[in-house]
Every structure is written in structure tokens, then in C-alpha cells.
Image (cartoon, rainbow, N blue to C red):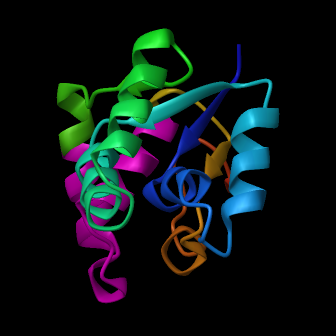
Amino acid sequence: MRKLVIDTGVLYAAMDRSDAAHRSCRELLEGTDRARVLPAPILPEVDYFVSRHLGAGAMCALLADIRRGVFVVEDLAAPDYERVAQIIDRYADADVGFVDAAVLAVAERLDEDCVATLDRRHFGLLRPRHRESLTLLP
């Protein structure tokens, strides 16, 4: 089964009804026939935004979705850390950080072509090593 690798912004926007991208992100996550993959490094970012704006109940609901299999959390494998470092170094001038680099590293390792992200500034620059480009959704 193909997978959709999900970045922080899409997951948060799907949770926050007041977010301008809420509808498109929620429709994407609910309507995809792909497995929904959350790279583990996005979870602290999501928790930060959720705790500031939505409260503990929203994070508990996300964790319940993870437990039910709505989302699959993908931990970084040992080789991913080397790839993350390469990405951070290569795109240092663009201020690409650990989480974005980890999302790309996971997409590469899983040989996936789609990343769900609102961060076009960074992901529009990133060039995966496993294919010519990524499809960025929504």
C-alpha cells in the first residue's frame, strides 16, 4: 500500500477548525486511500501548537487515532540520521531544520512520492534522492 508522509502543518491544520487550510487538509487526510504516515519528529511540533491553541483534548484525540491505526508513526531509523544531517547541511542557507529534513528522509526511505505539507518554501526546494521530485499535497 502506498503511503502519504505527513508534515506538521497539514496535521495541525486538519485539527484546527479556525486554520485557513483546515478544510483542504482535513479532506486530504480523510479522503486519501494511502496509509497516513506521521514521521515521529513532527509529533513534538504538533503537540506544541495543539497545546497552545487547542488544548489537551485535541492531542488526546490524535493519540487515540494513532492507537486505532488511523495514523502510523514512523520512527527514524539509524541511517536516517545521517541523511537528515546531509539535508540540513545541503540546505543550510535555506534554514531547513531537523523536522523537515526528517520528513524528507522518511519519505525517501519508504520510497514514497507524496508529502502532505503546507511548507512550500522548504519542501519546494528539497530534492529527494529517490526520485526527481515529490508531489506536495494539498
Q: Nearer the viewer, residue 113 or 44?
A: 44
Let me know if residue 17 appears in the view.
Answer: yes
Principal secondary structure, stretch drawn in magenta: helix
- The residue under the point 31% across, 54% down is 55
Give the quarter of the image for residue 25: bottom right
Membership of 106 in magenta stretch: yes
| Horizontal and vertical percent position of residue 47 | 27, 51
Specify whether 133 is left or right of 46: right
Membership of 41 in magenta stretch: no
Above or below, comparing residue 104 to residue 113 in the picture: below
| Horizontal and vertical percent position of residue 41 | 27, 45
Indicate the quadrant containing the N terminus: top left, top right, bottom left or bottom right: top right
Give the quarter of the image for residue 82: top left
Specify whether 20 is left or right of 80: right
Let me know if residue 135 appears in the view.
Answer: no
Specify whether 55 is left or right of 123: left
Q: Nearer the viewer, residue 132 or 30?
A: 30
Query: Magenta stretch?
Result: 82-108
| Horizontal and vertical percent position of residue 19 | 60, 71
Specify whether 95 is left or right of 62: left
Above or below, comparing residue 31 to residue 49 in the picture: above
